[in-house]
Image (cartoon, coloured by chain):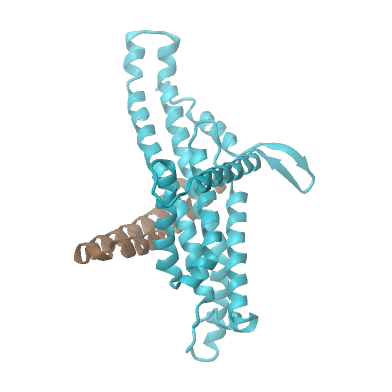
Amino acid sequence: MGALDNLGAEITHLLAELAGKDIWDFGWGSITTYSVWIVIVLFLVFAIIWVVKSRVSLVPKKGPVAAIEATVEYIRREVGYGVLGHKEAVDKHMPFLFTVFFFILAANLVGLIPGAKAATGAFSATLTLAVVSFVYFNYYGIKHSGLGHYLANIAPKGIMPGLNILVWLIELLSLFLRIITLSVRLFANMFAGHIALGAFAILTTLFVTPLIQEFTLANLGGATPAIGWMLLIVLMYGMELLVAFIQAYVFTLLSAVYIQLATSEH
Amino acid sequence: MTVIGYGLAVIGASLGIGLAAYGATTATARQPEMQPKIFTTFILGAAFAEALGLIGFVLALMSA
């Protein structure tokens, strides 16, 4: 089993590669490769929406414009009217939700291009997104019912005195846990996907390398598992395309649910 | 060892997602016209269950 000897070292190398490198370090923080990808994705989203916006017409079009229109309509129907309910709230919160959705979707999809990195594959990036969402729904919750009322409404009504303080504390903790679950879900999904793709690619190369170095019949037989690993890469890539959409959708959906919970009467 | 821990964490998450999918398919079979709503609820439930498994994954990587 000579092929698998280098696996550990290669995986360590892959993890180091995914960790992101400092481009410019200034004391309390640094610009990493992921920061650059965030900016690239932002400009990409701006550019795409700009082009699509100028081409939107009353007569439906085909191609990318129609695809984006269909996505927007699906999100508005399912997340907007499905979760937020009435039209007033949908019109108010949809711009934020669409911004989040398209940014995450673009970041996830850009990360699937070989050589590119997903902006959402860095924990600091997803943590920032989650904090933005957290601040947003708390701001509208407090604006809707006032600070005291909002804080009192964290716990459900009708629990016996004494116990309700405990329940309130637990609910407050779970409110802050939303930041962690939102960010970790997105980050871990992208990170795990990239590690799986990278590991399969490494395994393919490890099995093929002896064949490239010396073409013998034994090496040809030894290289056959590479076909299986290559098929797995293709399967995993399709899976990751699906995950890119689902995770963007889940983040948007959960943000909408939190907004709805914060702004509804108890 | 961390891999075993992650495997244990995944048992719960996979059972949860499996149950959610089971419920979603039976509900859709009973009332196909409610499919979009049921799908949204399924994704929500699966997301909550999945988050726990993923926290296990991140912890396994951190302590490795």
- Give the x, y percent position of residue A266: 49, 83
Specify whether residue A247 is in view.
Answer: yes
Answer with left or right where residue A24 lies relative to residue B28. right
- Give the x, y percent position of residue A10: 52, 29
Q: In the image, is residue B6 above or below residue B23? A: above
Q: Between residues B11 and A189, which one lies in front from this camera angle? A: A189
Q: Which tint is chain B?
A: brown
Furthest toward the bottom, the residue is A161
The chain painted cyan is: A
- The residue that appears at 49% across and 91% down in the rendered structure is A160
Furthest toward the left, the residue is B30
Q: Between residues A161 and A248, which one lies in front from this camera angle? A: A248
Specify whether residue B1 is in view.
Answer: no
- Give the x, y percent position of residue A24: 75, 38
Which quadrant does the N terminus of chain A fall into?
A: top left
Answer with left or right where residue A56 lies relative to residue B13. right
Q: In the image, is residue A170 above or below residue A230? A: below
